[in-house]
Image: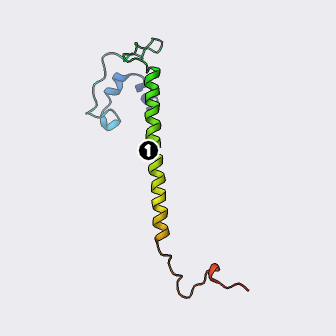
């Protein structure tokens, strides 16, 4: 019987509003319901015309050149960084093997 009453109460919003909070009703800070239902967005209407114009071929070519130039700068910086890192690593002394440990490259071959 209680299940039927709760399911029937779910059908009408005015009945839900009258349920006390201790019984599972809406909390007191809940905003009031709208007087009318919200309308669905007009899915079949055409959007308004754009205010901005499409990019011209000249502007697009200019932007592509700027992007290529920026990419080339990054490639050069990356190559220089790799060279600097390789130089730094080649100048570092190699660590001596730990005492008592043998590694395959240090063992004599027969």
**Quadrant in which the C terminus is drawn:** bottom right
Q: Residue furthest right?
A: 110
Is residue 100 left or right of 52 when viewed as pictured? Answer: right
| Residue at the image point whose x is 32% and y is 27% from the top | 17
Q: Residue furthest left?
A: 29
Q: Of residues 52 and 66, which is closer to you in this image?
A: 66
Is residue 95 left or right of 14 when viewed as pictured? Answer: right
- Residue 16 percent coordinates (x, y): 35, 27
| Residue at the image point whose x is 36% and y is 23% from the top | 13
Q: Label 1 belongs to which residue?
A: 73
Does 77 sit above or below residue 37?
A: below
| Residue at the image point whose x is 52% and y is 83% from the top | 98
| Residue at the image point whose x is 45% and y is 60% from the top | 84
Give the structural element (helix, strand or loop) at label 1. helix
Does 25 sit above or below residue 39?
A: below
Q: Residue furthest bottom?
A: 100
- Residue 41 percent coordinates (x, y): 42, 17
Structural crowding at the residue carrying mark 1, measured as other residues with C-alpha within 10 Å and reported as few (<14), some (14–19) or many (≥20)? few
Q: Of residues 56 and 84, which is closer to you in this image?
A: 84
């Amino acid at each position: 019987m209680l299940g039927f009453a709760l399911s029937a109460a779910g059908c009408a919003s005015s009945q839900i509003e009258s349920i006390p909070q201790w019984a599972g009703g809406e909390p007191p800070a809940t905003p009031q319901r709208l007087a009318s239902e919200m309308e669905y967005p007009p899915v079949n209407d055409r959007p308004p015309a754009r205010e901005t114009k499409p990019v011209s071929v000249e502007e697009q070519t200019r932007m592509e050149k700027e992007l290529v130039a920026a990419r080339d700068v990054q490639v050069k910086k990356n190559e220089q960084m790799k060279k600097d890192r390789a130089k730094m690593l080649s100048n570092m002394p190699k660590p001596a093997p730990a005492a008592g440990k043998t590694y395959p490259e240090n063992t004599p071959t027969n």
